[in-house]
Amino acid sequence: MKLRNLLQWRWGLLLLVVAGSIGWVLSLPNPREWKTQVSSKVRELAQDSLPVFVVTTGETVIPVTQSTYCWGNRGCADYAWGKMMTKQIEPTIVEAGSTIHIGLEDVAAPSILNAQQFLDDNGYEIVKLADGAFKAPTARGVYHYGISAYWKTDDGKYSKGDSSVVFVIEVK
């Protein structure tokens, strides 16, 4: 009789624990809904405003002009590229050989970041970046640049957005 009571008590306790756990689990918010709420909130932030490029050399901020992009709710916009886009931009004076830093505000690091120097013949030259920076030319002159950033899904198969800016420097 004692053994039977002991077994019933244990089974009763086990059922109570399991039932309590199920009730607790059922009271949790649906993880799919939570993920959707969080994801859509992040998506709203990302889709409503274009990434802000910050280009600097030393303490000097080099103004940039928005160019081509495909970004969330903003859709896509194609602008002229190369010197067609930069011919009206006032150059920022920089020191010969100074380091030009490229950064982005309030957005995850892009999957790909490219820089180009626009040439006189409507061509361009790839500028090699090291940790988001490159060296200004050492020869005097006016130099036109484009920066392009691309965000991709983790598997690299799909675009999450892209944005480009242009700027002009003068080495004296």
Image (cartoon, rainbow, N blue to C red):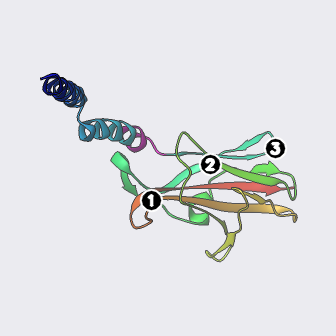
Quarter of the image with the C terminus in it = bottom right
Residue 146 is situated, as x and y percent measured from the top left of the image, at: 62, 61
Crowd rating for badge 1 (residues with CA inside 10 Å; few <14, some 14–19, many 20+): few
Q: Secondary structure at mark 3?
A: loop
Closer to the chain start, of discs 1 and 2, is 2
- Which residue is more in the foreground, 18 or 57? 18
* Mark sitting on residue 64: 2
Q: Earlier in the sequence, mark 3 or mark 2?
A: 3
Rendering quarter of residue 44: top left
Q: CA distance from mark 3 to mark 2?
A: 16 Å
Residue shown at 25% from the left, 41% from the top: 32
- Rounded to the nearest whole Å, what is the CA distance between mark 1 and mark 2? 29 Å
> Which residues, given as a range, are shown in magenta?
44-50
- Identified at 74% across, 55% down, the residue is 169
Comparing labels 3 and 1, the label whose residue is closer to the camera: 1
Check disc 1 and report the residue beneath it: 154
**Foreground pick, 110 / 85:** 110
Mark 3: which amino acid? Gly
Q: Which amino acid type is shown beneath numbered disc 1?
A: Asp
Mark 2 Cα shell of 10 Å, populated few (<14), some (14-19), many (≥20): many
- Tell whether label 1 touches label 3 (CB within 8 Å): no
- In terms of image quadrants, where is residue 58? top right
**132 within the magenta span:** no
Measured from the top left, where is residue 161 in percent x and y? 43, 56
Task: Tell me: residue 79, above or below residue 105.
Answer: below
In the rendered image, which quarter contains the N terminus?
A: top left
Residue lying furthest front in this view?
1
> What residue is shown with label 3?
58
SS for tag 2? loop
Taking the magenta stretch, the answer to whether it contains residue 49 is: yes
Q: Earlier along the polypeptide chain: callout 3 or callout 1?
A: 3
Magenta part, dominant SS: helix
